Amino acid sequence: MTKQVSLTLPDGSIRTFDGPVTGLTLAEDIGPGLAKAALAIVVNGEQWDLSREIEQDSKVSIITRKDEAALEILRHDAAHIMAEAVKELYPDTQVTIGPAIENGFYYDFARKTPFTTEDLEIIEARMKEIVERDEKITREVWNRDDAIEFFRKMGEEYKAEIIADIPADQSITLYRQGDFIDLCRGPHLPSTKKLGDGFKLMKVAGAYWRGDSNNEMLTRVYGTAWRDKKELKAYLVRLEEAEKRDHRKIGREMGLFHLQEEAQGSVFWHAKGFRIWIELERYIRARLAEDGYQEIKTPQLMDSKLWEQSGHWGKFRENMFVVPDMVPTVDGDIEVPKDARMMALKPMNCPAHIQVFKQGTKSYRDLPIRMSEFGCCHRNEAHGALHGLMRVRQMTQDDAHIFCRKDQITDETKRFLALFAKVYEDMGLTDIKYKLATRPEMRAGDDATWDRAEKSLADALTASGLEFEYAEGEGAFYGPKLEFHLTDAIGRTWQCGTFQLDYVLPERLDANYIGQDGEKHRPVMLHRAVFGTFERFIGILIEHFAGRFPLWLAPVQVVVSGITSDQDEHVKSVQQQLVDAGLRAEMDLRNEKINYKVREHSHAKVPAILVIGAREAEQNTVTIRRLGSQKQETLDLTDAIHKLKEESVAPDLR
C-alpha cells in the first residue's frame, strides 16, 4: 500500500498525496499561477529543488521570485550559467568554485591567459543565450570516488581536488544543465530560463586557489544578479551613487584626512576632519554622562599575561601587535633579554576595564557600574583588507562596559537600546533592523546560562517595542549579542555599534562583588558601543550625507564673501562676529567672481555662504545661500547670526 505524505503549508493548511511528491506537484496542486512562479521549496527548514521528492510528512513552503530567499538561488544559478558560458567559449579553462555573495556572485577560473574586462561582454552575451535555451537543471547523486574520476578525465583537476576533500563515505550532488555539470549542494532553479534578465558581469580580479598565496593565481569574475531588470538597474544606480559618495574621494575634496604607505591602516586627520571627530566625541560624551557612565582611561600597552588570562592571546594573537620588553645596552643599542616579557598593544578595552572594576571592594548596591572610554585600539588587519576609514589598524572606539547583576540585565539592555535609538535619530539614521545573535557551536558556558542570557536580551527587545530577527549561531564565544543594521540615504545597510552579554570574562579575570548574602558573586559584563569606531562611523556619515553634514557637524559652517573688494573690510567684520558667536566661519577675499567662489565653496560642501554686496554692506544685511538650494534669503546681520547659531547647536544641547 502506498504511504500517504501530508504537507503542512505556512498558513496551517495540510495537503495529502499518495506516495512521494515533488515541490512542483505541490505547487501545481495549489494553483497554476504558483506552479509557474515557483523556483524552489523549503522542506522542514531546508531548501530543496522543486523536482526533489518529499517522502515523509513535512512542513513546507514554496519560494517564488518575490521572496528574499529567491535572490541567493538566482545568484547561485547565475554563477553556474557563467561557468557554462566560459566552458563553451574557452574549453581549455578549468572551473573551480562559484558561490553566491552579497548582491551577486563570482566564479574562479584557471586559465593560462587570465580574463580581462573586455571578455566580460562576450561571456555575458553567451549567458543570455543559455538562459534563452531554457536548459533543464537536474540534480544527480554520485559516489564520491566516481565523481573524482569523472572530473579528472574531463581535465578538471581543481574540481576533483575539492571532491577528494569530502569524506569517502559521503555521497555528493552534481547539477547538470545542457552539457555542463558542476559539483553543488543546491538547490537550483528548474531551468536556466528561470534566471531571467536581471544579471550583469561587473569586473575581474585575481584570487589565489583556496585563498592561499602559496597556491596558483586564478581569475575571479564577479557579477550581480537580481529578480528582474528593474532591480538590476536600481542596483547599478546605487553603485554609481555610492561611487560619488566614496568617503575617500569626498575626504580628499574636503581636506578631511589622508592615508599613506608609511602608516598603513592609520589615519592622518586634518584640521577639518578632526573637527568632525571632536564634535562627535563631545556629543556622545554628553549623552553618556547623562546616562550615568563614568569615563576612564586605560593603558595602550599591556603584558601578555593579562591577555593570556582573558583568553585573547590564544584566540586573537595573530591580530595583535606584540612588542618585546626591550632594554638599552651600555653602548646605546637595544637588546631583548632572554627573560623579556611580551607586551601587546590592546586590540580591545574589556580586560583593562575589568582591572579598574577590581580595584576596591564592590557591593551589590554599587551595581550597575557603567564604565566608558574613548579607547584607542590596534588590530593587525591584513593589508588587503584595509579600506579607507572603514577598515583600519588603529581605531578609537566609543567603548563602554556595564557591570551588573543578573537581575539587572533586562533593564540595562532596555536602557542601552533607548540610548542607541536616540543617538542614531540625532545622526539622521532612523531605519534600524535589530537581530539577536544566539549561541555558536563553539562556546563557553552551559546551555542553561545561554538560555537565560538569550531570554534576557529577547525580553529587553520585546519590552522596548522593537521587532527583531534571530541570527542563529552568530553569537560571540562568551555570550549572545545584539546586532544593529542601519540603512543609509541610498539604501545600503551598515552594521554599527554592538551589545554583547558576557559571563565568561569576569570569571577568567576574577571579577566579583559582595552580594546581599555577604558572599562573593560574579558580575555580568555587558560590552557595548554606539558608534563602534570613530573612524568607520565618520566614514559612514561622510557617505550617508555625501559630505553635506548638518550644520552642527560641518567642519566649516559658514563662509563670508564680498561681491567686490570694496566689501573686504565689512566681510572681515562679519566673519569675526560669526566667530565670536561660536560659529566655525571663514572668509573669502580672493579677487574672483562671486559665482565662482559660491560654486567652489559648494563643491567643498560648506552649508551656508554669506554674500555681501554694496547694498548689504550699507544696510548691514547678508544674503544667505544654502548648500544644495537655488533659493537665497537676505536677512539683517544680527538675525542671520542668531538663526545660524540656533541651527548649529548639537542635538544633545537642544
Image (spheres, rainbow, N blue to C red):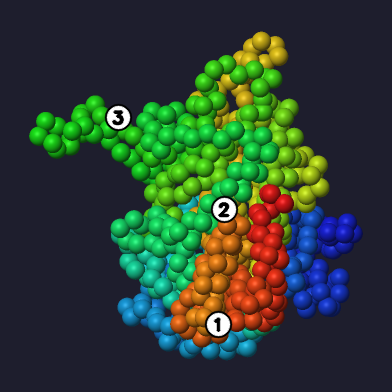
Q: Residue at x 49, y 60 (%)?
A: 273
- N-term mark: 3 or 1: 3
Task: Name the residue that disc number 3 marks.
Answer: 341
Q: Amino acid at mark 3?
A: Arg
Expressed as whole percent of the image width and height from the top left, the position of residue 549 reads: 60, 65
Q: Residue at point 64% right, 38% down?
A: 289
Residue topped by disc 1? 563
| Mark 1, secondary structure of its residue | loop
Marks 2 and 1, how far apart in space?
32 Å
Residue that sits furthest to the right in the current view: 13
How busy is the neighbourhood of tag 2: few (under 14 within 10 Å), some, or many (20 plus)?
some
Mark 3: few/some/many CA within 10 Å (<14, 14-19, 20+): some
Tell me the kind of residue under disc 1: Ile
236 and 177: which is toward the camera:
236
Labels 2 and 1: the sequence-earlier one = 2
Q: Do labels 2 and 1 touch, CB within 8 Å? A: no
Residue for badge 2: 279
Residue drawn at x 66%, y 64% as measured from the top left: 641
Residue 600 is at least partly visible in this image: yes
Q: Residue 137's image quarter?
A: bottom right
Q: Amino acid at mark 2?
A: Glu
Q: Nearer the viewer, residue 575 or 175?
A: 575
Question: What whole-number distance in Å separates the C-alpha atoms at marks 3 and 1?
Answer: 66 Å
Q: How many marks?
A: 3
Residue 228 in view (yes/no): no
Q: Closest to the observer: 156 or 609?
A: 609
Does residue 194 lie above or below 579 as drawn?
below
Disc assigned to residue 396: none
